[in-house]
Image: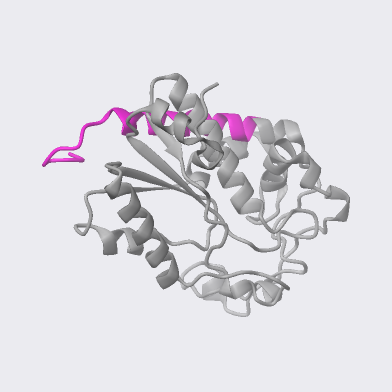
Amino acid sequence: MEKVNLIEMTLKEVRDKGNIEVAILPWGSCEPHNLHLPYGTDTLAAIKIAEISAKKATEKGAKVIVLPAIPIGVNSNLFGFPLTLHLAPTTQLSILRDIVWSLENHRIYKLLILNSHGGNDFKPLIRELYGKTKVWIFLLDWWNVRNDIIEKVCEDKRGEHGNEAETSWMMYLYPELVHLEWADDGEVNKSRLNSLEKKQIWTTRPWHLLTKNSGYGNPKKATPEKGEEIVEGATDRIAEIILELSEVKIDEKFPY
């Protein structure tokens, strides 16, 4: 199968690949996920989801490359746990700007950010760069293409961090890194603010006060089979998105 991950490719393989229409940038985080999943869960998932999707799209004719992943995200609210790493949004903007500049120099004008971390908010950054580059930046928060699959396959749908769904896809993608026997039940504390519980207002959640050990949602019913259904279903959909981006032509009226 043709390689799609730039970091694994040689100059000969890059040249043989020819013109690239779409670059995918996986972006994750470095933070704890309960006691049983690795700190790189979001990044590791982003890499595999991007690669699997790109390979499926390539088989259908897409001209796509997967860029090296950015392994750190916005995580200041997890500093209550050891060795959480954090990038400020302004730092993310600088990184994104330089990557876009690189792509523009190589005449690749479509960039798809495959985001795997809820704390990363790229919309303001994309708006900031709009009109300052020939590169069109698209954002795909990959949970937006998997939620209905999770609803179908998972028994305990509560939570969002180290829960049954996330543990299941990690058991499928990286079984050697998952220690389900170490996990706690992922129960969280309620806020004293009723309006916050009802999501009428929003604030940064100090994760060490919200959770026991950084997990949100019970992972105990996770299985690799559930993970396979989530991953393969989601990557089928993402592959179609990549193919569409690859085939569309940019003109003065793009994207309309």
Image quarter of residue 76: bottom right
Q: Is residue 145 rendered to the left or right of residue 109?
A: right
Q: Is residue 76 rendered to the left or right of residue 134?
A: right
Q: On screen, 217 above or below 240?
A: below
Image quarter of residue 214: bottom right
In front here: 231 or 44? 44
Visible residue check, residue 155: no
Q: On screen, 183 above or below 164?
A: below
- Quadrant holding the N terminus: top right
Return the x and y of residue 223 as percentages of the image width and height: 77, 37
Q: Is residue 190 rendered to the left or right of residue 17?
A: right
Visible residue check, residue 154: yes
Return the x and y of residue 171 as percentages of the image width and height: 75, 40
Q: Report the span colored magenta.
A: 229-256
Instruction: Decide whether residue 78 is among the magenta residues.
Output: no
Return the x and y of residue 200 as percentages of the image width and height: 46, 70
- Quadrant holding the C terminus: top left
